[in-house]
Amino acid sequence: MIKRITGRKILLCISGGIAAYKIPSLVRLIKQAECETEIILTKSAQNFVAPMTLETLSGRKVRTDSDFDGSIPHIKLAHWADVLIVAPCTANTLAKIANGIADNLLTSTVIASSCPVVIFPAMNSQMYDSPAVQSNIKTLIERGIKVVQPSEGNLACGDSGKGRMPEPHEIMHEIFRALCVHDMNGKNVLVTAGPTHEYIDPVRYISNPSTGKMGAAMARSAWYRGADVKIIAGPVELDGYALDVIHVKSADDMLQAVKSNLSWADYVVKAAAVGDYRAKNISQRKIKREGTDTLTLELVQNPDIAAEVGRLKREGQILIGFAAETDNIAEHARAKISRKNLDYVLANDVSTENTGFAYDTNTLRLIPRDPLKHEEIFTGLKDDISFDIWSRLIAD
Ligand SMILES: Cc1cc2nc3c(=O)[nH]c(=O)nc-3n(C[C@H](O)[C@H](O)[C@H](O)COP(=O)(O)O)c2cc1C
């Protein structure tokens, strides 16, 4: 969870859809992010989530139509908010917002607001696909309002299809994005992340402890800042919400995927821990232990993806490599820059505590190729330092 939005003011508007049951979890995440929150419930929403639940979790009185009085709460709340979220947004509330109808506290506040508005329609898939709903969504998008497409899956009504509200942590991603300055708009970012699996037989492989967290954090931060992001990920669980995730297994697969997407990218971030070696011969059958006390594997070098990208790199593309080292960090990192034609290396000492593989925190030393550019140390949560690294890369 990035700390950057601490203290920001989130106005959460809840209308009467079944997905409102997810909102208490969202309120908890907003509190964990140390943001302020005000909540508006429509009359119908109170059938799905109790005001007392939300008041307990948010620590604030929830606003309903009974507060819609001479104190002009809709104007005050609209001025107060840094971002306004409508989640879930019913077909009914969507229609009202699209048509400028302001007959309750929620819709009046939306129409009075000038901050970014993010709408999460959630409903039965037939309702969602209806011409009326689609036309209202189109109207809102044309007005510059962000309408987040519902996801597909099993719906509460028993149907299956498009209409599910994103999960609370996914809504948080949209909130972060709405609150960020989109200074990477129009930029294409290609990130590699995670380990590779180099199989020796059908059930065993050589790998490393990379979790893909650093690559995922770099990808997510760029997306928050408005970039289009593709992430080529080794076999690891990643939160790929709204990112274009390309799954690969081996170093060879990763190289092919990188090459296919290279011309698209303005920035290439090589955060994957690619295996340096693979088995010379992959056994087609499971290797049996019976009858052999020792096993000798013959390994051959994998292709060097960073070097290949460095060779193919076009004018204007920025290539950022990572160097996980245990000794002579800066020396090894600089050698890597010239050997692989990188623009930057982010070097870390994986022999120290709380840094590198699997940790949520990291300490990275940014070493630029250009000697006129300064080196910089980034330390902290991977989510946070990724954001700072992008600030630096954009400024350079
Ligand atoms: C059990 C139940 C579940 C409902 N779920 C949804 C829903 O998921 N999405 C939706 O658009 N409407 C749903 N509705 C219909 C809305 O509650 C209804 O249109 C209501 O007028 C919305 O009011 P509001 O937009 O002011 O909150 C549901 C109704 C019921 C009775």
Image: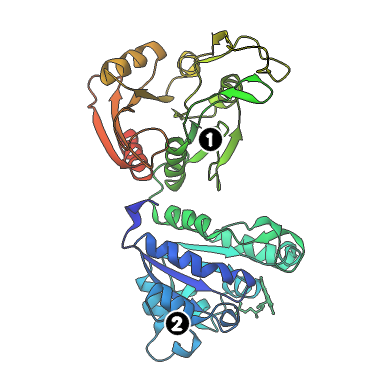
Q: Position of residue 174 (x, y in %)?
A: 49, 55
Along the viewing direction, whichever of 266 and 216 lies nearer the viewer: 216
- Residue 236 % position (x, y): 55, 36
Residue 115 position by quadrant: bottom left
Badge 1 density bin: few <14, some 14–19, many ≥20, Cα 10 Å: many
Question: Disc 2 on helix, strand or loop?
Answer: loop
- Image-based side of 377 in relation to 109, left or right: left
Left or right: residue 269 versus residue 47 is left
Q: Alpha-carbon distance for marks 2 and 1?
A: 41 Å
The residue positioned 31% from the left and 19% from the top of the image is 369
Q: Is residue 136 visible?
A: yes
User: Which amino acid type is marked by label 2?
Assistant: Arg
State whether residue 165 is above or below residue 209: below
x, y percent for residue 79 = 36, 73
Please report whichever mark, 2 or 1, sits nearer to the chain's N-terminal start.
2
What is the quadrant of residue 318 in the picture?
top left
Ligand 1 sits in which quadrant? bottom right
SS type, badge 1: strand
Residue situated in front as seen by the camera: 293 or 295: 293
Q: Residue at x 55, y 77 (%)?
A: 49
Question: Which quadrant, please, contains the C terminus?
Answer: top left
Q: Residue at x 36, y 15 (%)?
A: 336
Find disc 1 in the rendering and name its residue: 231
Q: Position of residue 259 (x, y in %)?
A: 57, 21
Residue position for label 2: 63
| Residue 396 is at least partly visible in this image | no
